[in-house]
Image: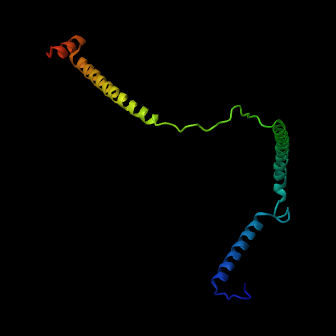
Amino acid sequence: MREFATSENPDMARAEQELSGMEAQLAAMDVDTDHATGDLIAPKGKVTQTGLEFARAVPEEKFHEAMYELLTRQYEVARVDEARQGSIVQVVDPAIPPDRPGSHYRLWIFLAGLVFALPLALATAWIVELVSIALGLRRRLGSWTAVLEQGWIGEAP
């Protein structure tokens, strides 16, 4: 980049900053590791710990590999069995279109339900309201006989 750009170029300045940052990181890594006792990737003090972690991970990896192989074999056997069996679904009676189109009974059923359900709902609401009034009077008057007397005669005891 120095061949075609000057030091005032913003891209050149940014590249030089990145380079100096990377050199600082490399120097920090060099300080952490001792070249006399090992290399940059695995110094001698950490080789035993790394080897121990590797030794623990190998059997687990072998187990997972064996499980994968076993499941792959079972999957292949299942695919072969499925292909051998053929179709399990059997059509007993094929569907045929109706001879005449459907009727408008749905509208009549809806209207009949509306005509019968509306009075029933009103009667239910009226009964629930009467029961709640009677229970309120019972709490206020103390007995059902007093409630009945007030309801029929109109007198409060």
Of the pair 53 and 76, the residue shown nearer to us: 76
Exactly how many numbered labels are in the figure?
0
Q: Is residue 91 above or below residue 72?
A: above
Horizontal side of residue 40 vs 21, given as left or right? right
Q: Residue furthest left?
A: 155
Question: In the figure, 63 relative to 141: above or below?
Answer: below
**Which quarter of the picture shows residue 22?**
bottom right
Within the image, what quadrant is residue 68 found in?
top right
Q: Say above or below: 125 vs 69.
A: above
The residue that appears at 86% across and 65% down in the rendered structure is 36
Quadrant of res 132? top left
- 149 or 8: nearer the viewer: 149
User: Which residue lies most toward the front here?
Assistant: 99
| Nearer the observer, 40 or 157 | 157
Q: Position of residue 38 (x, y in %)?
A: 85, 62
Q: Residue at x 72, y 69 (%)?
A: 25
Q: Position of residue 50 (x, y in %)?
A: 82, 53
Judging depth in this view, the residue of 123 and 129 nearest the camera is 123
Residue 54 coordinates in the image, percent (x, y):
83, 50
Which quarter shows the C terminus? top left
- Locate residue 19, reporting x and y percent: 71, 76
Residue drawn 65% across the image and 81% down it: 11
Its colouring scheme is rainbow
Q: Where, quadrant-wise, is the N terminus in this rendering? A: bottom right
